[in-house]
Amino acid sequence: MTEHHARPGKSARPLISIIMSACNAEGFVQTAMQSMLGQTEGDFEFLIADDASDDRTADQIAAIQDPRIALHKNPERLGLTATLNNLLPLARGEFIARMDADDISLPGRLAAQAALLREHKDIWVCGGAFSVRSAEHCYLDTPPQTDGEIKAALLFFNPLPHPFVMFRGATLRRHNLRYDPKMTCAQDYELWMRLALHHPEARFANLKDVLGQYHRHSAQVSSRRTQEQQALSKRVQMQAFRLLGFSPLCREIAFHEHFFFASPIKTRAEIAGAFDWALRLRHANDEKGIFDRTHFNGFLRQRLLGLAASNPALRQDGTRLLAAWPE
């Protein structure tokens, strides 16, 4: 990674370091940058890496003159995981904020997250709500907020929005935390799961405030490499399954896709199998204590409610099974 230009920020050690990778994002990157440069909390350095773009992304970045920006250029394309791992050691801030080159952060995002991390010294990672915009849809995503809720959700989906998270810098440095280089996507999901399972002192939070706008389009990794991302997400979940006592060959894990991908239930056998799998998860966690029992059991019930409602023809079966679900 070669440095293209870097200028001193307003303080020797900025409050926040923003890290952003950009690859072929010439149509979005300046809007993303301006959303960060216009933050109400202005004490930050903005570390941006151009990942060997084929278009004018690097020129678009360099055209915005601000002393807080440091542009780095990868001599060859490294991908998001390796690029972020290269940026993390350069981040000097008390807090480290993620940003993607095709998203938008609302003006109060950094101030709100820094305030929460200042007030709650035990929280390692903070995210928040965000809106999702695509050519077809626009909706609000409100992930679980408390530490117990977030960790309970980890076995089912990624509950911390990567483009809108803020880390506690000293914690990352003390534990030398990096993204797993083998995770070409779902790298954030793997990191959250690793922290939850192997650093029990790590705590998470999501603000109820809307922090930004996530831009869904055909060029992004989650659209271009959906199958790869899903496969890697399953690998992330296997970390927890093993601790819960399940083998990777356990055939019932196939039912977990109904929870993870929100697949609609099609047959009575499927809905019965999903309920049996949920009960096995509950009993395993009751025995092993991997996740907070109250939050985990409540989350299982929520997912079962969603499954029961996913097929009107099977709603009666779902209602019957839910009536027998242990309180």
Image: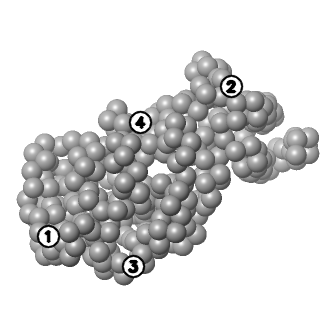
* Res. 225 image quadrant: top left
Instruction: Identify the mark nearer the N-term, 1 or 4.
Output: 1
Q: CA distance from mark 1 to mark 3?
A: 23 Å
Q: For the residue labelled by badge 3, is the local secondary structure a helix, a strand or a loop? A: loop
Instruction: Identify the mark nearer the N-term, 1 or 3.
Output: 1
Q: For the residue labelled by badge 2, is the local secondary structure a helix, a strand or a loop? A: helix
> Closest to the observer: 138 or 157?
157
Contact check, label 1 and label 4, Cβ < 8 Å: no
Disc number at residue 314? none
Q: CA distance from mark 4 to mark 3?
A: 34 Å
**Residue assigned mark 3:** 107
The residue under label 1 is which amino acid type?
Pro
Q: Nearer the viewer, mark 2 or mark 1?
A: 1
Callout 3 crowding tier (Cα within 10 Å): few <14, some 14–19, many ≥20: some
The residue under label 3 is which amino acid type?
Pro
**Residue assigned mark 1:** 8
Contact check, label 2 and label 1, Cβ < 8 Å: no
Residue occupying the point 58% across, 69% down: 208
Looking at the picture, how far across and down is residue 185, in whole percent?
A: 38, 41
Disc number at residue 228? 4
Q: CA distance from mark 3 to mark 2?
A: 46 Å
Instruction: Identify the mark nearer the N-term, 2 or 1.
Output: 1
Q: CA distance from mark 2 to mark 1?
A: 56 Å
Instruction: Identify the mark nearer the N-term, 4 or 3.
Output: 3
Disc number at residue 252? 2
